[in-house]
């Protein structure tokens, strides 16, 4: 295998991803540019409007499909999850997190029906009937169906020519889908005065972020159980519009698909030849080349090599491989490092957060890992014509920038307990996935 990271005499850094084969160059003089500039404009926000800034905000909850579940906090700080609330009771509690169907799914129920013969189970039909049994639930479901069809080109005249009961049957798909959104409570940070004071992953407390990650894991496990034809559930977070977000409101997405996808298939081929690939080619390489950013007892964060965009990779060091198989302490370890990476990045940088895990039908060991990518450059003709990606920030610079900021955040008490940079053990063989194997 080629050396994944080479620095030429002039300072140019050439990278090749050991997992994907992606080729990336970083040319000297570009790595120290600011990631973002000041906002082009900012608007004062009245406190009365802070919960109405987008369709994910609390005061506009009827603009999204019927909720699957929500996480709420008791006065003593303990959390609980409420499922399938009737529309009449949505205002009874303040959800820290909501799980809702995506209004415009990547793979809608029609895909699963047509290609796999999927039939909604009785439990889904019961949820639909219970929700639409009340006037408020019926009206909400019809409004969402109308909005979805109108966005697809249907006119109001076409809607009027069909009775409501017929349209209501379309609402079953709102309960049978397998593309969910996990929506956080805040659009803006508490006490915000301007519309650019966004609440992102890094502005959460470590406890809040842990609940966010754990709640997402619960949804991941549920989607595998609910869609028998799913071979993989993709989990990701797009932050800000340049990174693909529809709303500047913190949320993750989960999408069930009926194949593993090319990346996992490639990784499985590599793992057949080298089961310890993630250890030797990624984390051991990072330890050897001083690319470790942070670590705790259950996870390690490293500067990614061979990504089109500057990247931070967070690996679980547990023997457990699928997120829902991890203990709560292990989930907290991953969450704390991911939260710290977001906090060091800041809310003004567009990012993609991508989760990777071992699919249920795969026997080969694979670690749970999350990649955070900074979308600070635009792919153009050079990349398209050569398949050589120009990344403005090399992994060493990513490591140094992030470690410096994490020292400041740790001193301020805003991130979890962890070792940073040169404090890390840099031991080889830190990943435990290859020992798990179940």
Image: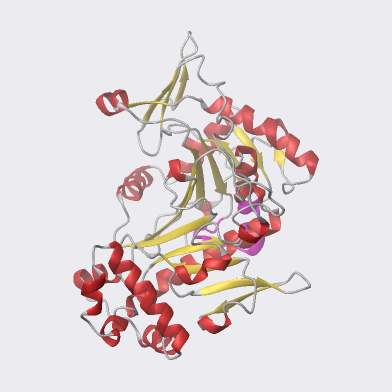
x 51%, y 69%: residue: 61
Please tell me in which quadrant of the rendered image residue 380 appears: top left
Q: Is residue 332 rendered magenta in the image?
A: yes
Extreme residue toward the top, this view: 10
Stretch of the chain drawn in magenta: 319-336
Assign the magenta stretch its main secondary structure: helix
In the rendered structure, the answer to whether residue 255 lies left or right of residue 42 reads: left
In the rendered structure, the answer to whether residue 221 lies left or right of residue 380 reads: right
Q: Is residue 30 rendered magenta in the image?
A: no
The answer to whether 13 is drawn above or below residue 165 in the figure is: above
In the rendered structure, the answer to whether residue 117 lies left or right of residue 4 reads: left
x 63%, y 62%: residue: 211
Task: Indicate the position of residue 117 as horizontal and vertical percent values.
Answer: 22, 76
x 41%, y 69%: residue: 224
Residue 222 in view in this figure: yes
Task: Indicate the position of residue 255 as horizontal and vertical percent values.
Answer: 38, 61
In the rendered structure, the answer to whether residue 197 lies left or right of residue 376 reads: right
x 61%, y 42%: residue: 341
Q: Nearer the viewer, residue 24 or 297?
A: 24
């Amino acid at each position: 295998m080629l050396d994944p990271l080479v620095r030429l005499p002039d300072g140019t850094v050439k990278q090749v991803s050991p997992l994907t084969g992606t080729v990336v160059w970083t040319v000297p003089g570009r790595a120290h540019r600011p990631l973002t500039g000041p906002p082009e404009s900012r608007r004062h926000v009245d406190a009365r409007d802070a919960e109405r800034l987008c369709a994910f905000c609390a005061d506009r909850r009827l603009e999204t499909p019927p909720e699957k579940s929500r996480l709420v906090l008791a006065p003593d700080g303990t959390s609980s999850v409420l499922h399938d609330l009737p529309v009449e009771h949505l205002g009874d509690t303040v959800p820290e997190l909501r799980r809702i169907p995506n209004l415009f799914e990547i793979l809608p129920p029609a895909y699963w029906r047509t290609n796999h013969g999927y039939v909604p189970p009785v439990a889904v039909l019961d949820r639909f009937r219970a929700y639409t049994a009340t006037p408020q639930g019926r009206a909400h479901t019809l409004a969402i169906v109308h909005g979805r069809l109108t966005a697809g080109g249907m006119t109001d005249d076409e809607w009027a020519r069909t009775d409501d009961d017929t349209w209501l049957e379309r609402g079953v798909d709102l309960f049978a889908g397998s593309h969910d959104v996990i929506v956080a409570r805040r659009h803006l940070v508490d006490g915000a005065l301007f519309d650019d004071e966004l609440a992102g992953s890094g502005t959460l407390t470590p406890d809040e972020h842990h609940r966010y990650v754990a709640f997402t894991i619960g949804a991941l496990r549920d989607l595998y159980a609910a869609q028998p034809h799913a071979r993989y559930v993709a989990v990701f977070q797009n932050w800000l519009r340049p990174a693909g977000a529809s709303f500047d409101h913190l949320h993750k997405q989960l999408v069930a698909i009926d194949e593993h996808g090319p990346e996992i298939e490639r990784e499985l081929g590599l793992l057949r030849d080298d089961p310890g690939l993630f250890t030797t080619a990624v984390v051991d390489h990072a330890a050897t080349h001083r690319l470790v950013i942070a670590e705790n007892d259950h996870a390690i964060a490293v500067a990614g090599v061979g990504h089109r965009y500057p990247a931070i990779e967070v690996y679980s060091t547990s023997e457990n491989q699928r997120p829902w198989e991890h203990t709560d302490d292990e989930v907290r370890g991953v969450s704390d490092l991911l939260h710290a990476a977001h906090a060091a990045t800041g809310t003004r940088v567009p990012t993609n957060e991508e989760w990777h895990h071992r699919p249920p039908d795969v026997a080969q060991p694979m670690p749970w890992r999350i990649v955070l990518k900074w979308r600070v450059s635009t792919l153009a003709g050079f990349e398209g014509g050569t398949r050589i990606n120009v990344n403005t920030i090399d992994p060493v610079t990513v490591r140094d920038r992030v470690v410096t900021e994490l020292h400041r955040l740790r001193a301020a008490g805003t991130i979890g307990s962890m070792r940073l940079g040169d404090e890390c053990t840099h031991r080889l063989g830190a990943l435990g996935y290859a020992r798990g194997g179940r």
